[in-house]
Amino acid sequence: MAILRHPWRLPLFALRLLACWIALVMGSIQAQRSGAPDAVLVGYMGHFDIHLARILYPRATILLDHMVSAAGVGANRHLASAGGLKHRLLKAIDTAALSRADIVIVDTDEHQKALPEHVRTRSVVCPVGATRAWLEAGADALREPTDDVLRVVFVGLFSPAHGTPVIGEALDMLSDDARIQVTMVGRGQEYSVTRLLAARNPHVTWVDWVAPEELPTFVAGFDVSLGIFGTVPQALNVVPTKAFQGAAAGCVIVTSETEPQRRALDGAALLAAPGSAIELAAALRKLAGDPDVTHQLRRAAHAHAGGRYLPGAVVAPLMDRITAA
């Protein structure tokens, strides 16, 4: 994304990629002394690394985590307009990466449907899910009752898909409601405009960063975890990581009412129309007005995540596909 904004940084990126590849080659040579792997997983944003993986492991089943396409990210962040040179370049990068994968992993049915037809037949849907650390943190937090002050958290990179200006507008509407205390964690593209919109609300705390290993316990200390509220295409087709993690941490999830989120979080979230600050503010007021109901919803979210979104359940379709391959 930095290169799309500053194309002159391309040579630096190429050097960094080369350095990473040298390290991967050396590590792969050492690892294969004990035997070649049956399958190799290329992680998210592995659009370039998958080509190296195919060279290093020609007989292995190559899996690509294609949670979001490069062209989609460029468009959603308003860095590559449809039909433009940058957009065509990103689509070519996506096409080349997909052509090298034996199995393509996506996170929602909507993303699977967006794949080219010849790729769709070798794809599998795996929800992002949450690790057991989140579920354990939620179990500890739920031992305490929900009190009269509603504690709300958002954690994210303030990208257009997150719709944080919508959150900012809702916080402005809630400026006079001391029952609702909000913590906003992170920085990113729309941070400044979000903070400006919420400037009148004295009940908002802004935190630049929380270490990943501290996040489960940190988020579990809140009653509500905010999801995404953007209206760009990506926002309408994903279930954000923060929704799975927040539910596992024992938080009520308040997020946008889209088909994938309704399907994934049915009965475990309050949903607001994408882009609607009014509906978001109303949902938070509703929760603040009834701590007992809020606590019941927290328990429901925690149980929902524990039953459907721990690692074993998430990877089951993938394991079936790998076995078949």
Image (spheres, helix red, strand yellow):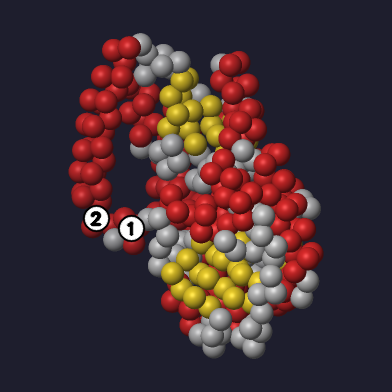
Q: At 57% across and 61% down in the image, what residue appears?
A: 221
SS assignment at label 1: helix
Whether 169 is drawn above or below 93: the answer is below
Residue 265's disc number: none
Q: Quarter-wise, where is residue 86 in the image?
A: bottom left
The answer to whether residue 251 is left or right of residue 41 is right
Whether 36 is drawn above or below 128: the answer is above
How many numbered discs, if any? 2
Which residue is denoted by mark 1 in the rendering? 2
Discs 2, 1 touching: Cβ within 8 Å: yes
> Quick one: label 2 or label 1, which is nearer the N terminus?
1
Which residue is denoted by mark 2 in the rendering? 9
Q: Amino acid at mark 1?
A: Ala
Q: At 63% across and 21% down in the image, what residue appears?
A: 320
Residue 136 in the image, given as x and y percentages of width and height: 59, 45
Residue 298 in the image, given as x and y percentages of width and height: 71, 57
